[in-house]
Amino acid sequence: MAESKGARRGLVVLADGAQTAFAAGAVAELTRAGRSWVSVRGAGLGAQVALLAALGEAEEAERRWLRQGEGNCPLLGSLLARGRQRVAGDEGLLLLPDALALSGWLDPVELDEHLAPETAGIPERLRRAGASCAVAVEDLAAGTSGWVDLGASAAADAAAALLAAVRFPAGWGPLAGGDDAAPFLCWGGVGLVDRDPEWLAGAGAWDIVCGFPVPPVARAGLGGSLLELVQRREEVRAGRSVAAIVAAAPERVLVAPSTGGWTVWAARDGADLGVEYPLPWERNGELVVRLVEYGRFAARAVSTSPP
């Protein structure tokens, strides 16, 4: 399905946490194969990859994740680890998390730094690029969820929507703000993706890039912690939704981790996607670099396959 230069399609990027490294590598590789996109959507941390793709800067997302790999992925550092660093010199102190009070498991300081280049002037930059970009956001206070069109929003609202969209359950805590009259508590994540989205109805060709396996795979080594189980539920829910979306129209091209693709890419006996592929919270520099490489591999398999 090789694309000529200038061919324009729709793009959806769905990924949470560490799994976004796969999506970044895949979208960058599709760009190198000649893909470009006019209509773009993103959920979870994949929303940042989607926005950069809409701006014509898909390879920048890939570079960001490779830099994360060089520093052992500080982006996915926990609030607890940060707190322990603060009291490291104080003998006799034991730092324990308050599970009922933690707003999220991951430290948002690194997240804000990771997103900073994208939060300024989003609507104007999208207009100059000639593309649209929408991100999935759920407002827990209002009890609503949907897609926020960044290009049609005020600059401050677009930045807030992006900051909310990248936060996912059991990862970074929801973005809090507003006033007493209109408070908000917003986050995103791949679990917001509908099985039959209205915006895909009647649409033409779409590239759908997912950081999670589609359809869902068995995870024999899954632990019993709430952190893992919440993220597993989001992964399964999104995997089923995307499988239904792709099955509904043959022109929708899927790039996602798969059991067969992982075995071929790993090129070793015993490679097992269900055991080795990370959940979003997992922090490991070497791991995220390999996910970027696997994303490139999966995208090449799609872009060079016959129609």
Image (tube, rainbow, N blue to C red):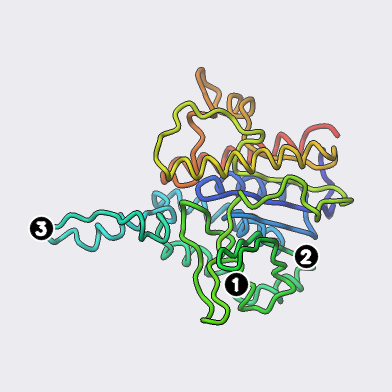
In the rendering, at what x and y percent does residue 69 appear?
45, 48
Question: Which badge, 3 or 2, is on the more N-terminal residue?
Answer: 3
How many residues crowd around disc 1 within 10 Å: few (fewer than 14), some, or many (20 or more)? many
* Image depth: mark 1 or mark 2 in front: 1
How many residues crowd around disc 2 within 10 Å: few (fewer than 14), some, or many (20 or more)? many
Q: Is residue 189 above or below residue 217?
A: below
In the rendering, at what x and y percent does residue 99 appear?
34, 54
Quadrant assignment for the C terminus: top right
Q: Residue furthest top?
A: 269
Amino acid under disc 2: Ala
Which residue is found at the position 44% from the left and 56% from the top? 75
Compute the Cα span from label 3 to label 1. Answer: 42 Å
Q: Which residue is mark 1?
A: 159
In the rendering, at what x and y percent does residue 18 appear?
50, 47
Q: Secondary structure at mark 1?
A: helix
Compute the Cα span from label 3 to label 2. Answer: 55 Å
Say if mark 1 contacts mark 2, CB within 8 Å.
no
Q: Which residue is mark 2?
A: 131
In the rendering, at what x and y percent does residue 257 appear?
62, 35
How many residues crowd around disc 3 within 10 Å: few (fewer than 14), some, or many (20 or more)? few
Q: Is residue 216 above or below residue 267?
A: below
